[in-house]
Amino acid sequence: MKRLAALDVGTQKIVYLIGERDSYGDIHILGFGETRARGIQKGVINDLAEAKASILKALKDAEEMAGVKVREVIYGISGGTLKNETVKSQNVKDTITISSGSAEIEESHINRLLDRCLMKSKEDGYEIVYYIPRKYILDEQGEVKNPLGLVGSKLSAEVHVVKVSTTIIRNLEKAITEVGLSPVNRSVNAIASADAVLTTDEKEDGVLVLDIGAGLTDYTLFLEGRPYITGVVPFGGINITKDLSYMLKIDNEEAEKLKVKHGEAYVKNVREEETIKIKPRGENREIPIQKKYIAEIIQSRVEEIFDHVVRDIERRGGKLSLINSGIVITGGSANLRGLKELIEDKTNLPVRIGRPSGIIGLKERVDDPRYSTVVGLLKQGFLSSGFELAESPNKKKSGFFKGIVDKFRSLFEDLL
């Protein structure tokens, strides 16, 4: 049996999962470790020592629960600021000639085509973290799922590529390796969350996945079964908490408790007469406040976060009108009451809350939207087990591209 770990380094929490895949292909979770994140802000490490201590605590707890040490890990990457675009995605197209007549398409042809697409997407200051062919086109036959073994003269591909700031990656890798972990793969948080919560039909019909975390909102728009736009906006649940703290004049800790216990994202769900008591800073007594006012604060920020995502999608050439399966919301903030109804009202699209699926063991422990990313990473890790790290500077290109072809062959076989 193959064992592997997954690491989700977030703004508010760090989660380490240890999993095992049995002979039937089922993934069993053996160990779970979660700790408060320190030294990290909006997916970016700003204090190496504190970040390392947090990661180490989570992995030690997971190993203690599992009763085994598993240091081979797949980790997720995100990050965002208002000033700089730290996560970028694009759909790169290219064409190669197979033969002047017709010839059978071999792995070497697909290697060359993917190589050209990835080379076209390179950008100073960024590294490719995730890539997947969206479609292949073979001569007059048009679009094909898997060109390997087919006969043709020209082959085209459209590849979805996600790039992340090199600085973010290097500092995260430094923290990971210095606590004794051995990275075997990496992925983008938005894609990992999508793989944990989406069905094949949703991906095919078109769906938007929103992973609303503490400091960031990662998103991916799927069309025709593959990611079309992937991005991140630098706002999340912490911003809601800070709004409550500022408007109600209470401490952040109290604001977070208030959000979790009494928070409502959809004002229409709250009755006018409903009130709760809070104790503002400097007051010696509790004062009543309308729950509707609290809901107005929360709804305003949630709408702003969603509007940022929509504007980002439109800037990259996408539209919500392209999707038929609606919107799936996951991440820690997906537990906010009224969120589903609010987004449905804003978009007139079906909305559901996404929980991670496809795993066995400790399911009751991770059956929560807040763990979608780490579960998705574990699933991706087992699917790509043995493949090279994307753009790893210490790996030879031949092995790197062989890994890509093997990976996509497996993906295509799963679809057939």
Image (tube, grey):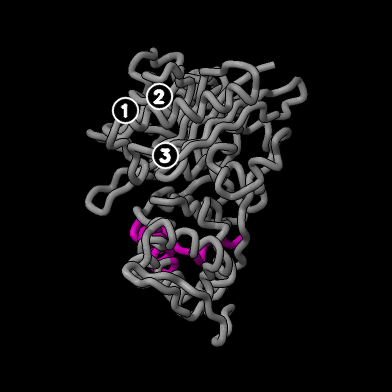
Q: Is residue 102 magenta?
A: no
State the image coordinates of residue 46 (x, y, percent, origin top left). 28, 37
Disc 2 residue type?
A: Ile
Asked whether 300 or 260 is in front, the reply is 260
Mark 3–mark 1 distance (CA, rounded to whole Å): 12 Å
Left or right: residue 372 versus residue 77 is: right
Residue 140 occupies quadrant: top right
Asked whether 264 or 82 is in front, the reply is 264
Q: Is residue 87 visible to us here? A: no
Residue carrying label 2 = 176
Q: Quadrant of the C terminus?
A: top right
Residue carrying label 3 = 37
Disc 1 residue type?
A: Ala
x 37%, y 66%: residue: 250
Left or right: residue 385 versus residue 307 is: right
Label 3: few (<14), some (14–19) or many (≥20) C-alpha neighbours in 10 Å: many
Asked whether 157 or 414 is in front, the reply is 414
Asked whether 135 or 231 is in front, the reply is 231
Q: Quadrant of the N terminus?
A: top right
In the image, the segment drawn in magenta is 302-327
Residue carrying label 1 = 49
Q: Is mark 3 on a helix, strand or loop?
A: loop
Disc 3 residue type?
A: Ala
Q: Which residue lies furthest to the front in this view?
A: 284
Q: What element carries label 2?
A: helix
State the image coordinates of residue 121 (x, y, percent, origin top left). 32, 36
State the image coordinates of residue 210 (x, y, percent, origin top left). 50, 55
CB atoms of marks 3 and 1 within 8 Å: no
Query: Of callouts 1 and 2, which one flags the residue occurring earlier in the amino acid sequence?
Result: 1
